[in-house]
Image (cartoon, rainbow, N blue to C red):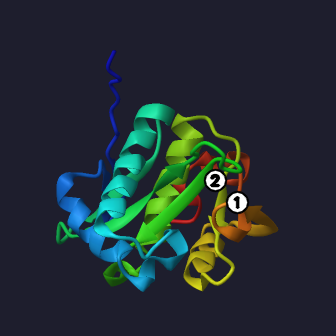
Amino acid sequence: MSTTFSIPTLETERLILRALCEGDIAFEKAFLASDDARFVGGPMPPHRAWRSIAMVIGHWALRGFGFWALEEKKTGQYLGRVGLWYPDGWLEREIGWTLMPHAWGKGFATEAAIASRAHAYDVLGWTTAISQIAPENEGSKAVARRLGATFEKHYEDPEFGTIEIWRHLGPDALVNGGMEAYA
């Protein structure tokens, strides 16, 4: 028996959120091999990076949602991935982001996370979401704050150790329950 699934494409002002493809893997391998990947399980060897991306794609088949690849509309450049995450053993449904270093500090994570959150609330019917952030990851905490999320508690993750849980505003607290609230 085969599983069929489709990954919707979303667009924002500057971004296309699309399915990951083979061409994205080289960027992910380079990133995940570097110290820049320390907050997402890296550095890791290329074969583990490939498996990590396969897991991200497989999440769509198993859960019906997941991470999108971010492509800059203007250049077509791969920027990283942002989306919805809830693997087995995870604390709660999450909105997450992992950007390539060349995309840091340009608002791409916030823009894509707003679109992801709107999809979670408006299409999937979620009523809440978290982001799990390493305590030292100031960049991700800044993104969470721009999204209106607030620090809720520390959590001892069996794999990653102490993690901060940031709670996102629910759909009832957002204008029209969608992405225009913080755009």
Which residue is farthest top? 1
Give the residue drawn at x 30%, y 61%: 47
User: Disc 2 residue type?
Assistant: Val
Secondary structure, mark 2, is helix
Compared to residue 3, the image places residue 143 above or below, namely below
Q: Residue 96, percent across and down?
A: 53, 60
Give the residue drawn at x 57%, y 76%: 140
Give the residue drawn at x 35%, y 29%: 5
Which of the two residues, 92 or 178, is positioned nearer the viewer here? 92
Q: Residue 21, percent across and down?
A: 22, 51
Secondary structure, mark 1, is loop
Which callout, 1 or 2, points at the residue further toward the start of the chain?
1
Compared to residue 85, the image places residue 33 above or below, namely below
Which of the two residues, 136 or 16, is positioned nearer the viewer here? 136
Q: Can residue 158 be seen in this view?
A: yes
Question: Left or right of 73: which side holds 69?
Answer: right
Name the mark on residue 24.
none
Q: Residue 126, percent across and down?
A: 64, 40
Q: Residue 130, percent across and down?
A: 67, 57
Q: Is residue 11 visible?
A: no
Compared to residue 20, the image places residue 96 above or below, namely below
> Which residue has dot 1 on it?
158
Name the mark on residue 175.
2
Q: Quadrant of residue 88?
A: top right
User: Disc 1 residue type?
Assistant: Pro
